[in-house]
Amino acid sequence: MTLPAAVQQVLTLAVAPEFQPTAESRAALADRALAARVRAILRASAPTGEVRLVVEAAQGAVRLEGVVASDEERAAALTVAGGVPGVVGVSGDIKVFRRPVR
C-alpha cells in the first residue's frame, strides 16, 4: 500500500459511523476528565499532596477509595475533591491506617 492510499484509508475510516462519538462515549470522556482533574488537584493541594487515592467519577459524582494516615487527611481529601469544579457530590471508602506508637 502506498502512503497516499494509506492516508486515504485512514481518512475514510475516521468519518465512518462506527468511529463517531456517541452520547455514551462523550459521557465516559467527561467522567474520566473529571476524575483526572480531581486527582491533579488532590496532589497539588498541600493537605492532600501525599495522599494517593483511587478516584472515580460518574455524572459529576466522585468516589474516593484508599488509605490515609489520619482522620484529618481523610476529611481534607473529601473537602478538596468536593471543591473541584464539576463535582456534584463526593463519597468515599477511605480507611485511616494509624501506625502503632512504640
Image: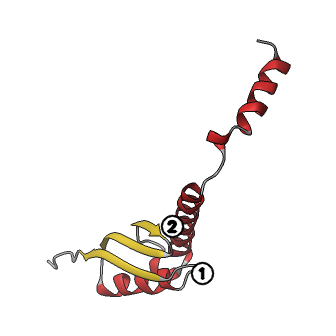
Precedes in sequence: disc 2 or disc 1: 2
What residue lies at 38% left-to-right and 72% top-to-bottom?
A: 64
Q: Position of residue 31 (x, y in %)?
A: 52, 65
Of residue 54 and residue 14, the one placed in the foreground of this image is 14
Q: Which residue is outermost to the top?
A: 1
- Report the residue at 16% width, 76% height from top: 100
Which residue bears the numbered disc 1?
85
Label 1: which secondary element: loop
> Residue 49: percent from the left, percent from the top?
48, 74
Residue picked out by circle 2: 35
x and y percent of residue 37 in the render? 57, 69
Q: Nearer the viewer, residue 102 or 44?
A: 44
Give, as a three-letter code, the residue at label 2.
Answer: Ala
Q: Which of the 4 image quarters holds residue 72?
A: bottom left
Taking the image as shown, residue 99 lies to the left or right of residue 5, namely: left
Please state if 41 lies on the left or on the right of 1 as rendered: left
For mark 2, does the 10 Å Cα neighbourhood hold few (<14), some (14 to 19), or many (20 or more) residues?
many
SS for callout 2: helix
Q: Residue 11: horizontal and vertical position, in percent? A: 78, 33
The image quadrant that residue 86 belongs to is: bottom right
Residue type at tag 1: Pro
How far apart marks 2 and 1 lie (CA) works out to 11 Å
